[in-house]
Image: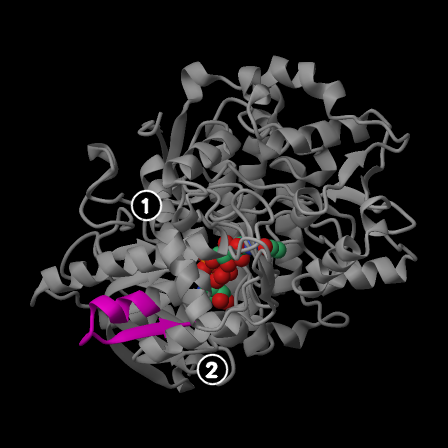
Amino acid sequence: MGLFNRRKTVFVDSDILVIGGGMGGCGATYESRYWGRDLKIVCVEKANIERSGAVAQGLYAINCYMGMQWGENQPEDHVRYARNDLMGLVREDLGYDIARHVDSTVHKFEEWGLPMIRDPETGRYQREGKWQIMIHGESYKPIVAEAARKAATEIYNRIMITHLLMDSTKPNRVGGAVGFNVRTGDFYVFRAKAVIVAAGGASHIFKPRAVGEGMGRTWYAPWSSASAYALPIQVGAKMTQMENRIVLTRFKDGYGPVGAYFLHLHTYTENAYGENYEAYWRDSIEALVGDYVNHTPVPTCLRNHALLEEVKAGRGPIRMVTKEAFKDPHKETIGWENFLGMTIGQAVVWASQNIDPKEINPELTTSEPYVMGSHATCSGAWTSGPEDYAPADYQWGYNRMMTIDGLFGAGDTVGGTAHKFSSGSFTEGRIAAKAAVKYVNDMGKDQPQVSEAEYEDLKKTVYKPLETYRVGRNEIVGGSVSPSYILPIHGLQRLEKIMDEYCAGISSHYTTNEPLLTRGIELLTMLKEDLEHLGAEDLHQVQRSWELQHRVLASECVTQHTLFRKETRWPGYYYRADHAKLDDKDWHCFTLSSYDQKTGDWAMEKAPVHHIID
Ligand SMILES: Cc1cc2nc3c(=O)[nH]c(=O)nc-3n(C[C@H](O)[C@H](O)[C@H](O)COP(=O)(O)OP(=O)(O)OC[C@H]3O[C@@H](n4cnc5c(N)ncnc54)[C@H](O)[C@@H]3O)c2cc1C
């Protein structure tokens, strides 16, 4: 008798199941209750919503706020901004939808107790930049989580969702999800009429700059393990723009954010010889991307590109000039507080490296790539748009519903909508929840059924790494190494190496081509075969096993998209050396993929980019 048979199965039925209790998930949970007073709303989270997700340790700024009450910006302005930053390719309908609602979300945060910083003269929220407002945000996540806790019927913490369940009576309709409690080991079957995936982005799919003893020090949260993508991909949902990974310019070794420094402290960068290098690269960038380099603000990827080229030319390191700004005691305080409220690690790194930014200009570097849908990049699921605004071919029923009936997304999960950040992700959760409630109400008695055979099979699959380890440990040859299994950490390092070397990571200066990508896909296929032999010595390692499975599937998707798009659309994020230039004639479009779990095949297609706003 297998070990898995001894595990208890817990059944949870709900109207709406929210997977992931981060910003998007808390927004979805909160709003589901508003529109669905009598519905059963369940939120399931692999950590604890109190401090989970990318906002866990707090933020110093809310990066998406229009300020419509003061006439500061209009939603159309934000769409233009995001479109420019993403080199022309965004879902304008989705972006507009978030922008028109995001201010009300921020006002709720303040009402719930989030301390906002106000301009002493105008009384308005203190702007850090055109879109950013400053907050005392150490407790941002607990405040948002409290609203979700009060709204939910039940919150299940410490349960990692591994697979979605499909309706056994109707094709292409979701029926729930399965997962396991990472502490007790109980198996959970969630049956739901609608499912909202809000499970964050993906770190650790590319080899990070910090390895070995520094492993885990990444820009994006190390626990963001690509479930937001893998769960929909597994069941065949269409994905978009998965090639559009993000590379961040950050303070070296601590990934401290640079936004407040540039925008609020008015610091600037220079090369090792004190020269302004950005202007130097302008003409060569224009040769690659045309007029996009003349846009204001210069798209994020192009600013990365100038930094990368300067370093390749041997004139690094690039430094942020802080010495001038830090002479002003007010700016010095802001500079340090910026880290203490959000990236304490950067302050510790500077202390340990004898860097006082008043005396020494600190180094900047570019990060390894990440995949996410809410920052200055827009990978994720292809979803239906708002009824009153989306063009006909972006609409198939309910707002933020994926190409699977009843399956919705928010935050990093949803593709095509960059620059939503924390407030926009919460807002998108609210938008998805409103539509999901309507979907559930419209459903009537025609409810999904899940097959017992399916979830029993999944139960065996989920705990298989424990079985594999129990058998394989008898053959341990040294330490924890056995010829009969692969440990999650080994699989992770193999994945990171493949993605780094073949799919444009740091070691190849973010450069790839068709032969490299083709070989990368072959190596990922072999890795997937070996994941059948994952071994887990305890529940923690079972969680690591499933995080790895999700990362590998998302990585495969990224690689397929990178192969499909035959151009270099975002120099500074990645380069297709065999198609070195931006090609608006053939590639001013979205890339879409869908995965067939039975055959392992990917189908790729293009979708038009509709420009709704002038
Ligand atoms: C380093 C960094 C700095 C940032 N700075 C800012 C800033 O200054 N201002 C700003 O406005 N925004 C900022 N952002 C962006 C903001 O944090 C994100 O946009 C936002 O958190 C995305 O929301 P989400 O719900 O998609 O993901 P998250 O908030 O990350 O939530 C995802 C949740 O899903 C859970 N989960 C994952 N997998 C599973 C699974 N399989 N089963 C169950 N649960 C699962 C996770 O534990 C997590 O709680 C920053 C992000 C990062 C990474």
Depth check, front residue: 94 or 110:
110
Q: Is residue 75 left or right of residue 131?
A: left
Q: Is residue 42 magenta?
A: yes
Depth check, front residue: 127 or 62:
127
Sooner in the amino-acid sequence: mark 2 or mark 1: 1
Residue lying at 42% horizontally and 70% vertically, measured from the top left? 111
Q: Is residue 235 left or right of residue 214?
A: left
Q: CA distance from mark 2 to mark 1?
A: 40 Å
Residue 40: which disc?
none
Q: Is residue 595 above or below residue 61?
A: above
Residue 97: which disc?
1
Residue lying at 77% horizontally and 70% vertically, measured from the top left? 478
Q: Determine which residue is flagged by label 2.
A: 185
- Name the secondary structure under disc 1: helix
Q: Is residue 550 visible?
A: no
Q: Is residue 431 above or below residue 153?
A: above
Query: Which residue is at the far front?
Result: 121
Residue lying at 20% horizontally and 44% vertically, measured from the top left? 387
Label 1: few (<14), some or many (≥20) within 10 Å? many
Q: Is residue 545 magenta?
A: no
Label 2: few (<14), some or many (≥20) within 10 Å? many
* Dot in front, 2 or 1: 1
Q: Is residue 159 visible?
A: yes
Q: Amino acid at mark 1?
A: Asp
Q: Amino acid at mark 2?
A: Gly
The magenta-colored residue range is 30-46
Specify the quadrant of the image occupied by residue 500: top right
